[in-house]
Amino acid sequence: MPLQPELALGPETFPDAGEATRHDRPFRLVLAVFTENRLSVLGIFVVLFFVLFCFVGPLFYHTNQIQTNLGIESQSPSLHHVLGTDDVGYDVLGRLMFGGQTTLVVGLVVALLATSFGVIWGAIAGFAGGLVDSVMMRTVDTMLAIPTLFLLLFLASIFTPSEPLLILVIASVAWLVPSRLVRAETLSLRSRQFVEAARAQGAGTPRIIFRHIIPNVFGTVAVNATFQVADAILAVTSLSFLGLGIPPPAANWGGMLSNGVNYVYSGYWWQIWPAGVCIVAVVVAFNFIGDGLRDAVEVRLQKR
Amino acid sequence: MRAYLIRRTLQAIVVLFGVSVLVFILLHLLPGGPAKAVLGLRATKPAIRAFDQRYGLLKPLPVQYLAWVGQLLHGNLGFSYKQNQSVDSLLAEDMPRTLVLVGVATLLALAIAIPGGIYQAARRNKPDDYVLTGMTFLFYSMPSFFLGTILIILLSQALPVLPSTGPTAISPLFDQIPNLVLPILTLTLVNLALFSRYMRSSVLENMVQDYVRTASSKGASRPAILFRHVLPNALLPIITLVGLSLPGILSGALITESLFNYPGMGLLFWNAAQTDDFPVMLGTTIVVGVGVVVGSLLADILYAVFDPRVRYA
């Protein structure tokens, strides 16, 4: 296994300065360490399975997920309805596919939005330093001081929930952690030689932040983004339980699960377990992937 | 030490100011403006004008803010028109119950996570470590209300030993111990998931330090190294961890209280969110925010007291 990154990578590389470059061989190292962790590889397969299940599954398993059918409400699993029907007559298996689409999309888009914003915020604060940094980071501290669910519940009760709005609301809380991580790394990066070199060549602050600092925090950010997906899925789920999820006929696993919880005393297990298991499986999978990535990125940093 | 404490306290004060500004912004984001939000959508124009006049809402924003903070500093968190009771008195009833839930669940979680983390680190990458790590991951990845529901299914349906609802607000908490068990157990498991991943890696991190090698080359036995040298060092960051986890623990309490109908601040907030009882929501948010800021300040001070490296840095 090539543990030592090669030194002569090209004219733009200054290995001593420790800057990541586009010809980044260590990427292979990351991949090697990552695939060593069997749980992370399992995580990748679980996520792939659910993507196929939710987006390709409905092509083969046709169900009506628009109109309710009270004539067949809460039927137990049968040949017609493999996982039974829910309290308004939707087929549960079909609804898992349909609701999974929303859950996965919300998770991924929140992670993307929150991470991008957090990275920019953190990099600017860390690079600027001084008063700007203080003001920006105290803003983050302030928002972190109010527990996420309280803030989310507040925002969700002010704005009527819809899918895009829900994404914005969750992202508006989720960017705080990546911004802190990136700021901390930027603080150590900004005094490195490659930043000095870039400045000596006449690069302006925006160029240094976007072309030199941000690519170098990529490892940390990728790890965090993976955990963000898991957290965002849990956040939608919790909001659905608190009654502020996406209103029907749209569906998501969290909504299905919290609806099913109402029937815990009726013994309708098929309205609780399938959605619950899907959520836990996907969240565990993303956490495994994040863990594997973290180990891989840490090794890269140590070997550099 | 003193310089650190002063700096850290000033920082907390700035964040408290931030929390008040944030809640003030939320107040103004409310649908139809504060007056309508507080008085209800059917409020008459004269009533709204009287309200605006009384609370100085026609004045410029900074003046409004100062007046509002002045009220807060006098301990006046507002009045719930929906429940016809002051927010202070509502919180005074519910806060102690949340403190019991959160306090007991956090202590129990620590009591399990600390020995658990040492055990896992000592048995690193053995089958039992994998099983425990897997369980931690599972609890960590489970929506807390799902975890609570599973406990209800197991402990009050399959084995009907515990009531599935939390205590009532009418009689004192400690007369209703059986009703306390499931909510506390749920929140304990949620907190345990937060703590034990950290505890294991904290012990592992310390086990590769130079001082461990020194101790072992001087002939100290493995248990002696683990308990005399590694444990105190691994335990210290737990103080910070609890401080940092406060918001997460309170979010967990919100869900737990809603699931079990446990009459605490979380349930109060949730009910308020459903009935658009904004004064209660704002008041609770302020109290929770202040609690988190003060809690993490205390954690940092404690940490500095115990760890000389922070004191002299």
Image (cartoon, rainbow, N blue to C red):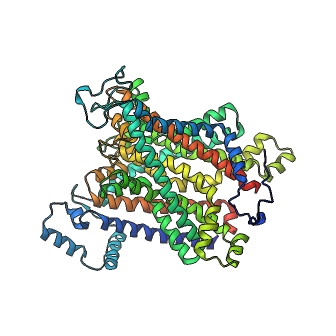
Question: From the image, which quarter does the N terminus of chain B lie in?
Answer: bottom right
In percent of width and height, residue A71 lies at 22, 26
Q: Residue lying furthest right in this view?
A: B218
Along the viewing direction, whichever of B169 and B117 lies nearer the viewer: B117
Residue B197 occupies quadrant: top right
- Is residue A274 rendered to the left or right of residue B228? left
Residue at the spot x=35%, y=72% of the render? B69
In percent of width and height, residue B178 lies at 40, 34
Decide if residue B305 is in sight here: yes
In percent of width and height, residue A49 lies at 52, 35
- Is residue A65 rendered to the left or right of residue B48? right
Up the image or down, B259 lies above or below A167; here it is above
Up the image or down, B171 lies above or below B248; here it is above
Decide if residue A234 is in sight here: no
- Is residue A16 rendered to the left or right of residue A250? right
In percent of width and height, residue B156 lies at 39, 28
- Give the total of numbered labels: 0
Residue at the spot x=36%, y=55% of the render? A165
Residue at the spot x=67%, y=41% of the render? A35
- Is residue B99 rendered to the left or right of residue B55? right
